[in-house]
Amino acid sequence: MPIGTLIEWVWPEETSPPRNPVPTFHTYATRIRRSLERVGVPVVLVGEDGSYRLEMDPTEVDLHRFRSLMSDARSELRRGRVPQTIVLATEAVRLWRGRPVDDLSSERAQAWRTHLVHDEWIPANTVLLEAMLAAGEFNEALTRLNDLQADHAHDLSLAKLRMSALRGLARSSEADAYYFSIRRRLLADGDEQAADHLRRYHENLRFRAGETHSAPRVEPTTRPRQLLHDIADFVGRTDLLRALDTATTKPPGEPAGGVVILDGMAGVGKTALAVHWGHLARHRFPDGDFFFNLNGFADSAPVQPSKVVDDMLIALGHPPDRSLDPRSRELLLSRLLANRRTLLVLDNARGTAQVRDLIALLPSCLILVTSRQRLTTLSATTGARRVRVEPMAPAEATDLLQARLGEHRQVKHHDLARLVQLCGGLPLLINVLADHIATSAPTELTGFARHLDRRQLIARLGEDGDGSAAADSVLGWSYRRLDKPEQRLFRLLSLHTGPEIGVDVAIACDGRTPAETKRSFGVLAGAHLLERPLILDRYRFHDILRELAAHYAALDETPESRATAERRILTFYLRSATAANRVLYPYRINPTEFPVEEGVEPVIFTGIAEAKSFFNEERTNLTAAVSFAGARGHHEYAWRLTDNLTSFFDRHGYFEDSVAVRKVAVSSARAAGHRDGETSSLEGLGMVYVTLGDHVHAQECFDTGLRLAVEDRNEQAQATTLHHLGRLEMLRGNPTGAVDMYRRSLDVARRIDDQTGQCWTHCRVGEALRSLDQHDQALVHLFQAQWFAQRIGEQTAQATSMATIGSIYLDRGDHRAALAHAEEALKLAEAIPDLACTVHACTILAEVTREYGNLAAAAGYAIHAIDICERTNNASAEARSREVLGTVRFANGSVSDAVSVWRHAADLYDRTGNTARAALLRAKIEKTPNGGIDLPAARPASPSPDPASDATRPGSEDTSP
């Protein structure tokens, strides 16, 4: 949990949080660890990257034990094992001692506590009470209810259980009086739905108790079989069919009553699944099956519950007597199906209100409800089991398309794969597509498959004059049922090109209040028009629904409104990235600001951890935003946003992303006519190419950037580009040429008083002079770099210069000083963090510890450096790290391993343009098999304390023969 989140939980708004959270939490963590040592349970508090994690066995946490016990209790109750349910649920509720996290009063803690009580504590007691009632323990249940209702007097589930307990004790008049008092309160509060639900429950209790004997006993005269025809070529869905079996069966294999909800997005195949399963399971329902399309999402009016009641009476051989009022007909249906095993499929339900009354009438039926809505209220009030229908996996979708096409229509493999991918796993689209292909000429199929896009698939296929089967028509019902604000948000979110949509960026795009936008998000997720991942306040589109939203955006939004929404999205990302960049790298010079959309609130960052978290969470979205901005002509946004991303990208090894956005930035800055932006983008792109070992493209970028800088008399850009050209020469194995470039860069940086430029150039000159064995001059420059780094707060330059100073002391044989500097450099690099600098420090530490004779530690440092290089594609640094690891292997006697590692290093040197170093390493390899090479062997252990005596780095290994 990040420190920022912990502060939100522990410090209420009226209390000031710690001014310096990191050291404060470090102190707290130390105290907590001391306390944990006395607990007697294996538990570790880990701190890393501005976050803390508690590592322990979940079964030692009472909340996890409570949840596990309740899960077992519910399973036992479903199996009808009442005594076992009582034992497990009693043990679970005994773990609940007092108010959860009682000492926390923050808003987050209070919200969590409320959620826990209502969603877990009361339902747990409900399970226990239901089992007690089933066991006839009415007095004990009533005693527990007295305690519970003292704190939760208005909870409807507890009120229903109290009514049952009183009737179990034959206190019917008291139960009736209690029922009327609760119902009056609900009506007074305006909650008519709850009052009506309680009424039906009360009537059902009386009916079960035999208190209503006025109605004569009736029997069905027929056993209806009304399921739709099964689908002959039904494909796949094995897991969902198995889930339906589990949800509708109780031991020992008997069909269970109650409600099962099949929910999922439009076109995902809910109806076909329900019908197919109904036919497979028909033998379980000897008294009949019913199917009703409720038209919840259709052009025609929704079917009313009274119509379903009447049709079911007709099917059962009891046509409704119109002299009976609706309630009497409902009671007749309830009596007809009492204690009968029937299946009722209520297809395409619009919401809970459409099916709630029907479900209350038929307690012994299995009722299968399909809907595009989540039907959360129905699940909560009836305890319905839920089976979510997801889009088909690619293999299943392929099988379905092939089955629908039949053997007479062969499709090439690559065409078939593209068509399946376009359909997004939705059987609706697969069926529409298969029908279109079946009626087309075979010679046109390849061209059709190559040119078809999702917009055509959604809007055009299926329109043939025989009523619309187009996906736009069917999928669009969900959209058209939305209110205007939700329709507009759905449309505008299609303009967001990243994979996940945060609530903050949606608020910026939507232009309404946060509360209004969050409510609309809930509506869209409830209608399965958006998917909600596990991360709170983040959503995503199914590919087909994104295209549908874009289709409606093109139809219902003006070009001006779309462009405004695009700029608002980009403004949010630009302003947020700028703010995060300033927190992480305050010494950087940011581009001059330009007019952006008003009223867009960026993310506010209170510390480094939050800024890092933003870049990590939004990295893919930010990269997509840059590409989108360039493609849509928002060029000022594209290159400025890139400028605020790339420091983080580069320092954390996201080089592929860095190249992608910087290419866009170069083009956009050029299109916007911003020469400084184009120059800086070229410099940055060249720098990443250097890191990736692509020296040819790096040279092109630097040469173009230097030409622009000279033409514009931009001395800042000249100094920076000359610096990068020096680094390029260094990597090519030409330190003399590098020193010349660096000194030219340093002259310009001094002239314009660019302290950051001077800092880094002194650092790089020192590295180059060290390669030329000019140690004294190198140290002068490196100490100068450290002075500038401390003055301007440039920690990465400080760590880099510290590591290079360590390497010079290593060259001079002063291993103690080399070790001290390298360890300090590593500590600084990991605290920033800066992966490239970490690699540099680890490589030097590998050399130092090898000199001390600690080969295991040396290998550990080198392997850690290689691991980072591989993850970040830093080929130049990887070559050096592998060369050092080979030397360690050789010193340890593992000659074949050493040769293998050196060969890999030589290949990397060649790939990155350092052919001179590659040639030297290959010459060394040539001598090795004959034993003629005289490589530095491990020296005797130093009398000084052995550095990193055990596993110095994660992944350090024992390299003994």
Image (cartoon, rainbow, N blue to C red):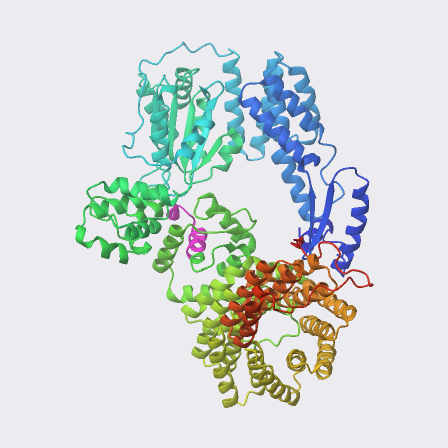
Q: Quadrant of residue 799?
A: bottom right
Is residue 633 visible in the rendered structure shown here? yes
Q: Is residue 488 magenta?
A: yes
Figure check: 299 above or below 720: above
Q: Seen in the image, is 112 located left or right of residue 296?
A: right
**Residue 749 drawn at (x, y percent):** 63, 86
Which quadrant would residue 766 be assigned to in this image? bottom right
Asked whether residue 932 is drawn in magenta, I would say no
Give the magenta range. Answer: 478-491
Q: Residue at x 37, y 53 (%)?
A: 548
Where 529 sits versus 650, above or below? above
Left or right, 244 with reference to 775: left
User: In front here: 708 or 945?
Assistant: 945
Q: Residue at x 28, y 35 (%)?
A: 233
Q: Position of residue 917 (x, y in %)?
A: 56, 74
- Is residue 154 among what the camera can see? no
